[in-house]
Image (tube, rainbow, N blue to C red):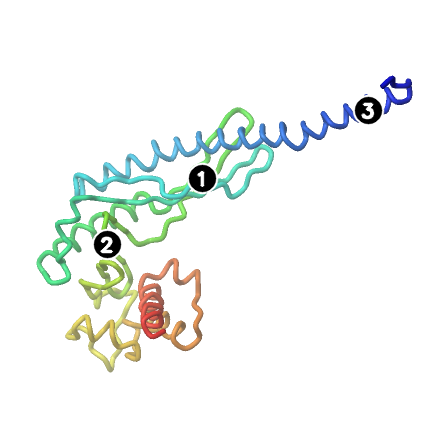
Amino acid sequence: MKLTKPDKIIFSILGVIGIGIICNKVIYPGFLALKESQSQNIAKDFVLEDFVLPLQKNLQNTGFDDINVSIDTFKTDISFENLREYDFDIAISSKKIKEYEDIANDEKKAEELYSIMEKMSNKFENGYSDYSKQIAINEDIKANIDYIGNFSLEIRNEGHKYVFYNGPCFNTLDMDLETIYIVHEEDSPACPLNDNIDYSNQEKDEVLDNPDVEGPTLGSYTDGYNDIIEDEEYDLDRYEHDGEYRKGVDDAMDELDEYY
């Protein structure tokens, strides 16, 4: 087929448009994705060196010599021109914690693990829980990095999850969502005792299994429990920052799951 001059011009224009589409839809987005991936990797490596490894060493010195801290999630919240914001969470694991699988029936072991995790939690809260940094990815891009984890300390192994909750009224140690050890903070100025009720002599089962008990010691737990049982919804911000409220919500959800 012999092309006329106008046909050649049209063909050339279509060819240029085709190349432009490939560049705009394939090559350029691919370049941006590669650039973003490289930026994220640099930020992630920084978090590993600046946060994860020091935290791991600190926790190992507190209780378990085999504690391993790893980045659980690392996500881009904002990526715009020369601005990057990343959020991350971590996972803490240990094989040695297998020694405590029977603590639900062994109060001495439960107390021992509670003490270890309390020390770990204090280290974590005092040095790492409010972690945020700004770093330079290169001469053009700055990145803000924030830790988004909650304020409880979790240790996992192959079969179980152990959680230490630190609250103003009482601290608990849970294994697989079941509270196995509890310490009341009756003298805490943040949690004055109700004049008409003395919680100091109550067993943990009485305290945790009775959501109708009123008073400041169990207020947060009761609020969380009742929000689910009565309204089937809860306050997300309070859930993230109030250990007792979170425990009440979780227990109520577990009960509803069993009921249905």
Residue drawn at x 44%, y 65% as measured from the top left: 235
Seen from the viewer's position, the closer of residues 202 and 89 is: 89
Q: CA distance from mark 3 to mark 1?
A: 46 Å
User: x and y percent of residue 99 in the render?
Assistant: 12, 49
User: x and y percent of residue 13 in the render?
Assistant: 82, 24
**For residue 99, above or below residue 191:** above
| Image position of 70 (left or right of 13) | left
Residue 13 disc label: 3
Q: Quadrant of residue 106?
A: bottom left
Q: CA distance from mark 1 to mark 2?
A: 27 Å
Q: Which residue is mark 1?
A: 145
Q: Residues within 10 Å of mark 1 (few under 14, many from 20)?
A: many
Residue 230 disc label: none
Query: Where does the N terminus fall, quadrant-wise?
Result: top right
Q: Amino acid at mark 2?
A: Tyr
- Give the mark, 3 or 1, whose residue is nearer the N terminus: 3
Q: Find numbered disc 2 in the image and state the secondary structure of the residue it sits on.
A: strand
- Give the mark, 1 or 2, whose residue is nearer the N terminus: 1
Q: Residues within 10 Å of mark 3 (few under 14, many from 20)?
A: few
Q: Which residue is mark 2?
A: 162
For the residues labelled 1 and 2, say whether their Cβ atoms are less than 8 Å apart. no
Residue drawn at x 11%, y 63% as measured from the top left: 105
Q: Amino acid at mark 1?
A: Ile
Q: Quadrant of residue 252?
A: bottom left
Q: Find numbered disc 1 in the image and state the secondary structure of the residue it sits on.
A: strand
Q: Find numbered disc 3 in the image and state the secondary structure of the residue it sits on.
A: helix
